Image: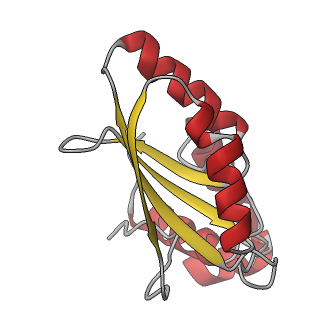
């Protein structure tokens, strides 16, 4: 889908506040409500707007600990990659998982309440997966920046 400057404004405003009313959104982008709503619906239909969510405060939710986990598999066969991915998708503690290039095969962001919770996650879930050669955990000390707003220009 080709997007223009008005679509980019709409997307930027919706990324900041997904609950903005069409009346406010249309006023801020310089359109009347009907054409603005048509553009939002077209952006949704195209898949550019994937969904609307509430972004929670991780600390306030009682999950202040972020752990970045690097995983090296014994083999990079398709079956092993698929099995690992399927397991990761079932675990709510894993917020992000990326298949990587370089020294490690996967990078995960895991959120937990405390060190004991991470130890439990590690022992009862991650280390029980077949085919893992090594696991390296790094604990985040401070979140310097977090954003879910894409830089659309």
Q: Quarter-wise, where is residue 52 in the image?
A: bottom right
Residue 114 at x, y = what percent? 71, 75
Image vertical order of residue 139 relative to residue 92, above or below: below
Residue at 47 percent of width and 67 percent of height: 6
Quarter the N terminus occupies: top left
Residue 121 at x, y = what percent? 68, 52
Residue at 77 percent of width and 68 percent of height: 54
* 150 on left or right of 67: left
Residue at 61 percent of width and 55 percent of height: 95
Image vertical order of residue 139 relative to residue 1, above or below: below
Q: Quarter-wise, where is residue 58 in the image?
A: bottom right
Residue 151 at x, y = what percent? 37, 69
Asked if residue 32 can be seen in this view, the reply is no
Asked if residue 151 can be seen in this view, the reply is yes
For the residue pair 66 and 36, the one nearer the viewer reads as 66
For the residue pair 8 and 109, the one nearer the viewer reads as 109
Q: How many labels, in total?
A: 0
Quarter the C terminus occupies: bottom left
Q: Quarter-wise, where is residue 90 in the image?
A: top right
* 124 on left or right of 16: right
For the residue pair 74 and 48, the one nearer the viewer reads as 74
Residue at 33 percent of width and 13 percent of height: 77
Q: Please, which colouring scheme is shown?
A: secondary structure
Residue 14 at x, y = what percent? 63, 69
Image vertical order of residue 125 relative to residue 66, above or below: above
């Amino acid at each position: 889908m080709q997007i223009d400057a008005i679509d980019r404004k709409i997307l930027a405003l919706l990324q900041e506040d997904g609950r903005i009313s069409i009346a406010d959104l249309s006023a801020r982008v310089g359109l009347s409500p009907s054409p603005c709503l048509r553009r939002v619906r077209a952006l949704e239909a195209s898949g550019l707007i994937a969904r609307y969510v509430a972004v929670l405060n991780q600390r306030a939710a009682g999950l202040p600990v972020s752990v970045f986990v690097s995983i090296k598999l014994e083999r990079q066969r398709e079956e092993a990659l698929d099995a690992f991915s399927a397991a990761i998708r079932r675990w709510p503690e894993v917020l992000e998982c990326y298949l990587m290039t370089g020294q490690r095969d996967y990078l995960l962001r895991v959120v937990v309440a405390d060190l004991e919770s991470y130890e439990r996650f590690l022992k009862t879930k991650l280390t029980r997966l077949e085919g893992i050669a090594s696991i390296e955990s790094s604990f985040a000390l401070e979140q310097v920046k977090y954003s879910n707003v894409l830089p659309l220009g």
